Image: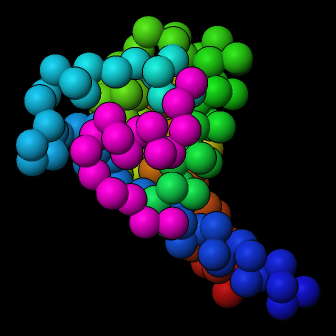
Amino acid sequence: MKKSVLLILALASILLSYQAKAVNSAPHGVDAAMLQITVGDIVDMNAKEFAQKTGQRYSVKERITFGIIKSKLKSEVKKGNLKATDSPAKVVQESSGGFDIVAFLLALFLSIIGFAIVFFFFERSSRKAALIGLIVSVIVYGGIFLL
């Protein structure tokens, strides 16, 4: 049991500490034109080739993270959610949404109806905030009804 918890914590720390700085900005000494790579290029290269392309030296943790992200990109390309010609910066920009306070408040105050409104009429990135609001509303309203 302890080994599985430690494994989950280790994987979470690796995944949560990932930053796409090598994709979004050109490192010192590397021409920005060299970084015009696609998702297909990333799927086809390994961590060593990626380090040579970006001109940076990566730690073991960053190489493992690269492998995990590479496999996720490959599965998204197979599912058809991504194209091999998409830019990694576009993928990062689309996936990195902030916390949507409006969606959270809708789901918090209107509960299931608010969550349905967010689900059908808001962007996909707002659904997580709405789900958190729904869970909080169920806990708060459930606590009120239990008293």
Location of residue 128 with respect to 144 vertically, above or below = above
Q: Residue at x 16, y 20 (%)?
A: 33
User: How far across and how far down the image is residue 21, in percent?
Assistant: 26, 48
Q: Residue at x 55, y 38 (%)?
A: 46
Location of residue 135 with respect to 49 vertically, above or below = below
Regarding residue 114, the answer to whether it shows in the image is no
Question: Split into 4 quadrants, where in the image is the C terminus?
Answer: bottom right
115 in magenta: no
User: How far across and how far down the image is residue 89, in percent?
Assistant: 30, 29
Q: Nearer the viewer, residue 20 or 67?
A: 67
Q: Quadrant location of residue 12?
A: bottom right
User: How far across and how far down the image is residue 40, in percent?
Assistant: 51, 18
Q: Nearer the viewer, residue 19 or 136?
A: 19
Give the residues drawn in magenta, as a range: 44-60
On screen, residue 98 versus residue 29, left or right, reads: right
Q: Residue at x 33, y 57 (%)?
A: 57
User: How far across and how far down the image is residue 98, in percent?
Assistant: 31, 48
Location of residue 43 with respect to 98 vertically, above or below = above
51 in magenta: yes
Q: Residue at x 83, y 90 (%)?
A: 2
Q: Residue furthest right?
A: 1
On screen, residue 23 versus residue 124, left or right, reads: left
